[in-house]
Amino acid sequence: MAVNLEDLTPEQIEKGKACRTPEELLALAKEEGVELTDDQLDQISGGDAWGSIYAHLLDCAYCGNDVMEFYEWDGDRRFYRCPRCGGRTWD
């Protein structure tokens, strides 16, 4: 059964936050025994769509909200916005 991102343990989320590429996240999922759907795999391997998955692993530096929203990719960096306070960051 594929994972729901909300079902990840705090330890898995912390490990996921340390991943800087889709390849690292895929390796972590395999190591943790986390099964991903074909759609999730496509998103992770699909360039800027990686941002929408990775955003679930970010915390807002301003208010501490544990989910950021992916909103832009400029070909080099991914930009995220906090739905709670509007704080912004990038990777």
Image (cartoon, helix red, strand yellow):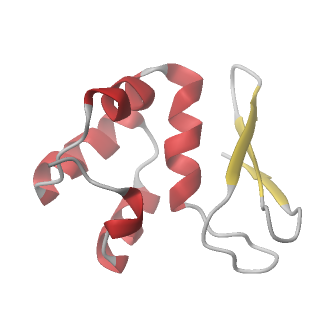
Which percent across, then down, holds residue 87? 86, 63
Which percent across, then down, holds residue 22? 39, 35
- Asked where in the image residue 32 lies, by quadrant, the reply is bottom left
Q: Residue furthest right?
A: 86
Where 37 sits versus 18, above or below? Answer: above
Where 37 sits versus 32, above or below? Answer: above
User: Looking at the image, which residue is at 17% across and 46% down?
Assistant: 35
Which percent across, then down, holds residue 79? 75, 42
Pick the front one: 59 or 38: 38
User: Looking at the image, which residue is at 21% across and 47% down?
Assistant: 2
Which percent across, then down, holds residue 48? 59, 25
Q: In the rendered view, does 72 fall on the left or right side of 41?
A: right
Pick the front one: 52 or 90: 52
- Asked where in the image residue 78 lies, by quadrant, the reply is top right
Q: In the rendered view, does 74 fall on the left or right side of 27?
A: right
User: Looking at the image, which residue is at 75% across and 73% down?
Assistant: 61
